[in-house]
Image (cartoon, rainbow, N blue to C red):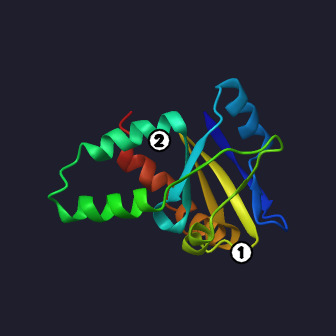
């Protein structure tokens, strides 16, 4: 559903703009509300309301008696906030999430199929540089053709 890589800066009011392609996909799929939360590798995860509810069901089904599950759920759910982009696709990311992801001004927004990831631009470049060389290796381990 969401694909591609886009560079965007926070505006003077601290708002981020959803890329126009993602706004088009949102309109086509009647998505108005998103949930933004702490992601992995110090990025932010952004889910449509429908995808968020699917993920929530998965994590609610895990045993809370396991410390790893409790820790993960605390980090994921305590950081979550619902956002509704305005007509221009702008939305505010709370300061605690910007701090978590290290986003000050420049960001990269990527589509990862069922979710959107929001990265600090420098952190994304570092991740990409480190990971792009492992792409084929990882594919070979993951994909059985």
Judge by depth and name the residue closer to the eye, 117 or 92.
Answer: 92
The number of numbered discs placed on residues in the rendered structure image is 2
**Residue 116 position (above or below residue 23):** below
N-terminal label among 2 and 1 = 2
**Residue 111 position (above or below residue 75):** above
The quarter of the picture where residue 74 lies is bottom left
Residue at screen point 49% across, 56% down: 80
Kindly identify which numbered label has been placed on residue 6: none
Judge by depth and name the residue closer to the eye, 114 or 141.
Answer: 114
Describe the element under mark 2 as helix, strand or loop: helix
Residue at screen point 31% across, 47% down: 59
Residue at screen point 74% across, 37% down: 23
- Percent x, y for residue 29? 64, 25
- Percent x, y for residue 100? 54, 72
Q: Quadrant of the N terminus?
A: top right
The crowd level at tag 2 (other Cα within 10 Å; few <14, some 14-19, many 20+) is: some
Judge by depth and name the residue closer to the eye, 100 or 121.
Answer: 100
In the rendered view, does 64 fall on the left or right side of 127?
left
- Percent x, y for residue 56? 38, 43
The residue under label 1 is 104
Q: Residue furthest left?
A: 65
User: Marks 1 and 2: in contact by CB < 8 Å?
Assistant: no
Q: Quadrant of the C terminus?
A: top left
The residue under label 2 is 52
- Percent x, y for residue 118? 63, 58
Residue at screen point 85% across, 68% down: 12
The crowd level at tag 1 (other Cα within 10 Å; few <14, some 14-19, many 20+) is: some
Describe the element under mark 1 as helix, strand or loop: loop
Q: CA distance from mark 2 to mark 1?
A: 26 Å
């Amino acid at each position: 559903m969401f694909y591609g890589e886009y560079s965007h800066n926070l505006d003077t009011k601290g708002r981020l703009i959803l890329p126009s392609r993602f706004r088009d996909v949102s309109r086509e799929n009647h998505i108005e509300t998103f949930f933004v939360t702490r992601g992995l590798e110090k990025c932010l995860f952004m889910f449509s309301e429908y995808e968020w509810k699917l993920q929530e069901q998965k994590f609610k089904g895990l045993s809370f008696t396991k410390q790893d599950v409790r820790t993960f759920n605390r980090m994921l759910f305590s950081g979550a906030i619902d956002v509704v982009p305005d007509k221009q696709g702008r939305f505010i990311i709370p300061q605690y999430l910007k701090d978590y992801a290290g986003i000050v001004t420049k960001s990269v927004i990527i589509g990862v199929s069922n979710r959107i990831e929001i990265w600090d631009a420098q952190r994304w470049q570092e991740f990409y540089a480190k990971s792009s060389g492992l792409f084929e290796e990882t594919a070979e381990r993951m994909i059985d053709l």
